[in-house]
Image: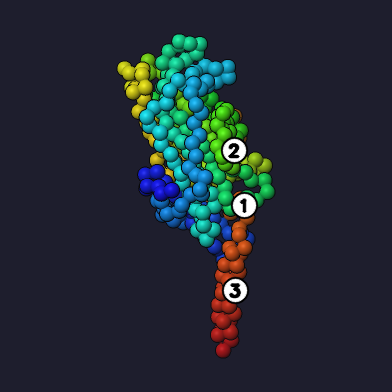
Amino acid sequence: MKHTPNTVQGLKLAAAIRPFAKRIKVGVSIVAGAIVGLSSIAYGTNEPPAWLPQYYLPDTPVTLGNPGVISITAYGNNKTQLTAPVTIDDLGTVGWLDFTYNTWSGNSLPAPGVPELGGALEGGYFNTTLQLQPGWQYGFVQIVSSTFSGTKNVWNAPNGSWYPDTKNQTDPDYPYEYLSGGVNPPVAPTKAFQDFPNRDPSNGDQYWNAQLALVVKNLGTHECVVIGEFNWGFSVTGDNPGPAGVTPVAPYGLGPPTVNFMNVLGNSFNSTITPGSTTWSISYNIFDAIIPEPAAFTLLGWALLLIAGAVYLRRQKAKT
């Protein structure tokens, strides 16, 4: 199946072999606020497995909350599929991101309730070849910003500011990392994700934006490595409570994490800056998280031999 540049985007990370390093370092790093070591994003350069893309949104009606507080009665005409290879230099494509997005309309419960509008995103990451070191696991981390931050915002973030999309201040992981009930794709994700944010149009024009990142994390050492992220969301027109009142912000901008993402996450999970939270190390580098392939070790071996040979020749020349 062919995919256009608008529907398939590739996340490509650079692998850097450093002389005398104990491990191969894979990923990106920050130097003076600039991202270095990242290859260009590839569009449509890899063909997905035969079983991708898959559809993930549950059939309507969908009840949100436990107990149910909102009923999704219909999806919009804004279905978008994001199918993206995750590629690391020298290792090739190590996995795939696959998500289904749409807008939705519904009402609060008990019925008839008041109109509710929102966006829906469901899918996950499919690992194919990347092996993680013991103690590391995949996850998703999301930060959000909205016209109204909401009364359940434990971060006390002002309206319009960014904050982690979790109530758990000890772990940055997104809380709903499983597929909706009744969603059973032929191949299940290695790590799943679902989110159905909503807004009440009676509160006027408003927006809800998110930055969602694939990460690997270590619960024992409180390390979180951000592999890459993308944006998504929706906006609501206050004078239109019907399905046409919600405007899609389909997934876009897949690439390295932004400075904003890293700052929000780093400041939120820093007990000195945010009292009551647990301090986590937030980085781009995967050097402690993955098991390099034998080919990577071979390259490192040749690099070390070349350096050792150069040192030997230099010493021999100095003796003459």
What colouring does the structure picture have? rainbow
Label 2 with label 3: CB-CB less than 8 Å: no
- Residue at screen point 54% across, 52% down: 94
The disc at residue 131 is 1
Name the image quarter holding residue 147: top left
**Of helix, strand and loop, which one carries label 1?**
loop
Q: Earlier in the sequence, mark 1 or mark 2?
A: 1
Q: Which residue is mark 2?
A: 279
* In the image, farthest residue toward the left: 239
* In the image, farthest residue toward the bottom: 320
135 lies left or right of 203? right
- Residue at screen point 37% across, 22% down: 243
Label 3 with label 1: CB-CB less than 8 Å: no
| Three-letter amino acid code at the position of disc 2 | Thr
**Of helix, strand and loop, which one carries label 3?**
helix
Label 1 with label 2: CB-CB less than 8 Å: no
**Is 216 located above or below residue 297 in the figure?**
above
- Count of picture labels: 3
Residue 13 visible from this viewpoint? yes
**Of helix, strand and loop, which one carries label 2?**
loop
Q: Say few, some or many: other residues with alpha carbon within 10 Å of mark 1 (under 14 / 14 to 19 / 20 or more).
A: some
Q: Position of residue 162 (x, y in %)?
A: 45, 32
Q: Nearer the viewer, mark 1 or mark 2?
A: 1
- Residue at screen point 48% across, 11% down: 111
Name the image quarter holding residue 174: top right
Q: Which residue is mark 3?
A: 305
Name the image quarter holding residue 232: top left
Between the residue at mark 3 and the residue at mark 1, the CA separation in whole angstroms equals 27 Å
